[in-house]
Image (cartoon, rainbow, N blue to C red):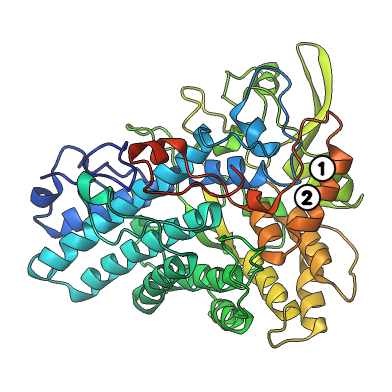
Amino acid sequence: MKKIIGISLMAAVGLLSACEKKLDQLPISEAPTETFYKQTVDFVQGVNAAYNGLRTYPDRLLNLSETRSDNLYAVSDGGVREWEGINSFHKTIAGNAYVAEAWTGNFSAISRANQVLEQLSLKGESIIADATLRTRLEAEARFLRAFFYFDLVRWFGKLPIIDKPVLANEALEIGRSSVPEVYDFIMADLKFAADNLPDVYKDAADKGRATKYAAKSILALVHMTRSGPTYGIEGPGLGLNEWNQALTLLNEVIDSKKYSFLAKYPDIFSYTNENNAEVVFDVQYNNGSNPITGGTFPWLLAPDNWFQELGFGTQGGLTIRPVSTNLLNAYEAADSRKAFSIQSGYVANGVPESRSFFKKYIDLTKVPRNNRLDWPINFIALRFTDILMLKAECILKGAPGSQADVDAIVNQVRNRAGLDPIANVTLPQLMEERRKEFAAEGSRWHDLVRSGLVETVMPSWIAAEDVQRVMQPFDKNYILYPIPQSELDVKPGLYEQNKGY
């Protein structure tokens, strides 16, 4: 009997084929789970199918984190756009396509991880002779399951915990568990992954697979997120004091010497410098394959008329999602990151457009000519600069270290951007440096929530930025997104809607 994909009862049945670059796989979408796993390569393909769940992760960050934050003033300038309700804190976004994708996309990927984990427990020992490989595949699947659950808990708070494949009627009986219970589940998977994944992969074909340091980095971020304020809601912050635990893990990543700080900011995102020394974990993309294995995130925040003016076809960004005036003004004059990350005005159809947009991932020599869904650049989910700046955050929150340590980290980042050093860096200053360093990388909303600054930053930003007076007042309940209406409708009463919606 086939199992459902993900907790969403609207999702398709059966295994979906993976399409990650350099993770060689076979199509398995037509094979029932129970009969597919017959040889070692089948288990590798099963894990690859779980990796494929990362494909929409960058788009999700740009739509739900970047657009929600003070980095974009993304009000619509023509027609009704899905992102407008996200940007403007509308209460009626339970039916929003971006919100629904965050739920179904993550749970679909979790289901794929659960399928391979179940088959490993049932058949793995008898089929996979190499015990090291068998354990590694389990660790990869558990890393991915934790990764997707961590993404979910930061968007939705309480979640149904699904630790094995379930039938549709079984899913109808699984309610949402508390946030602490979800974190316990996530952390158990990440600890197993950190203990059993390799430091590096020797085979070039394995580029992009999770390492033990990727697991430790995510686990550190879990500790930090749990330590954020509760805001009086059942959200990602639990008010714990786990900054020391996070710092220990971050130092292990730093001390491994597997990663390093690149001298030039653009080199981090270069199409010809993928898998560079900054990359701790990324989502792998390629182009020119069948099925399509490229990405869509490079153009997501860029308007179509800009591409058209330059002679390229429509990409899909539709109208402009402008960078906020507040962020534009936050960059110091000498900051080289601004020009690299942001297109400051352009001309379309002979008409000047003064508003700016993010172009960080766009190389105009690499625009796909045949399919706008097929951009070949990887998305860096976690990089070494992030590890360093998270360490500085832990120290400012009371973990072992000095103000000099914090200042040194921040000034290393500022020096690369062409800026003068500063002293006695505070938490708000650190978050502003992170804002400019990671602009368009999808971290801003999570940074504001974790740091406790969201309740002060967002209301003041709305008051100053919302010149069209279309945004709703900020409410702490909007730290979370609503449970998608489609999930509530499957079995009324199974889930309770998040407060504020």
| Residue 462 marker | 1
Q: Residue at x 82, y 14 (%)?
A: 351
Residue drawn where x is 78% and y is 50% of the image: 458
The image's mark for residue 198 is: none
| Residue at the extreme front of the image, as rendered | 493
Q: Which of the 4 image quadrants contains residue 294? A: top left
**Residue at x 53% of width, y 33% of height:** 96
Q: Position of residue 434 (x, y in %)?
A: 74, 60
Please state the horizontal and vertical placement of residue 109, each as a whole percent of the image.
35, 50
> On the rendered structure, is 221 left or right of 406?
left
Q: Quadrant of residue 367?
A: top right
Q: Nearer the viewer, residue 426 or 241?
A: 241
Q: CA distance from mark 1 to mark 2?
A: 6 Å
Residue type pointed to by label 1: Ile
Element marked by disc 1: helix
- Residue 21 seen: no
Which residue carries the number 2 mark? 458
Please report contact status of discs 1 and 2: CB closer than 8 Å, yes or no.
yes
Kindly give the residue lying farthest to the bottom in the view shown.
400
Return the residue nearer the eye: 106 or 169.
169
Q: Is residue 71 left or right of residue 26?
A: right
Q: Is residue 283 above or below residue 430?
A: above
Dot 2 alpha-carbon crowd within 10 angstroms: few under 14, some 14 to 19, many 20 or more: many
Q: Is residue 276 above or below residue 361?
A: below
